[in-house]
Amino acid sequence: ATYAVEWSDDGSLLYGAGRHRGDGVNPIVVWSDAGRGEARLLPAARARLGRLLPLRDGRLAWASEDPALGVFDRAGAELTRRDAPTLG
């Protein structure tokens, strides 16, 4: 299910995120060519992704219900990540 859809700051990329039906990490889906290109997956969080925020220079910030958050660059490299604390 998709819960967040955003365009990159220059409109060349379309981002979608939510909850993946399979096991593992919930990805952010990135379509090139203003949403008409091939999709690529950026692994992001264990929980549902609820917020995407396009930033300058093609960067993308995300937040999940873990709570966790992070930032990817235009190429899909993870620039920063903050996972939920673990209680134990």
Image (tube, helix red, strand yellow):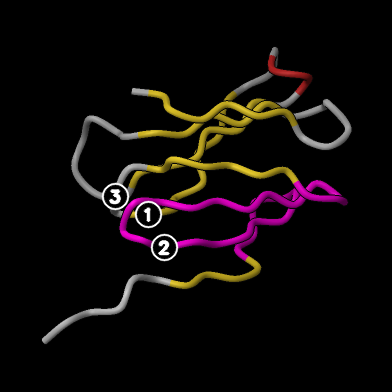
74 within the magenta span: yes
Residue under numbered circle 2: 68
Which span is picked out in magenta? 55-78
The quarter of the picture where the N terminus appears is top left
Residue under numbered circle 1: 45
Q: Is 36 on the left or on the right of 23, as rendered?
A: right
Quarter assignment of residue 20: top left
Amino acid under label 3?
A: Ala
Which residue is situated farthest in the bottom direction here? Answer: 88
The x and y percentages for residue 9 are 84, 37
Image mark count: 3
Q: Is 56 on the left or on the right of 31, as rendered?
A: right
The quarter of the picture where the C terminus appears is bottom left
Q: What element carries label 2?
A: strand
- Rounded to the nearest angstrom, the CA distance separating label 3 from label 2 is 8 Å
Closest to the camera, between mark 1 and mark 2, is 2
The x and y percentages for residue 17 are 47, 34
The x and y percentages for residue 22 are 21, 35
Q: Are marks 1 and 2 in contact (CB under 8 Å)?
A: yes
- Rounded to the nearest angstrom, the CA distance separating label 1 from label 3 is 6 Å
Residue under numbered circle 3: 47
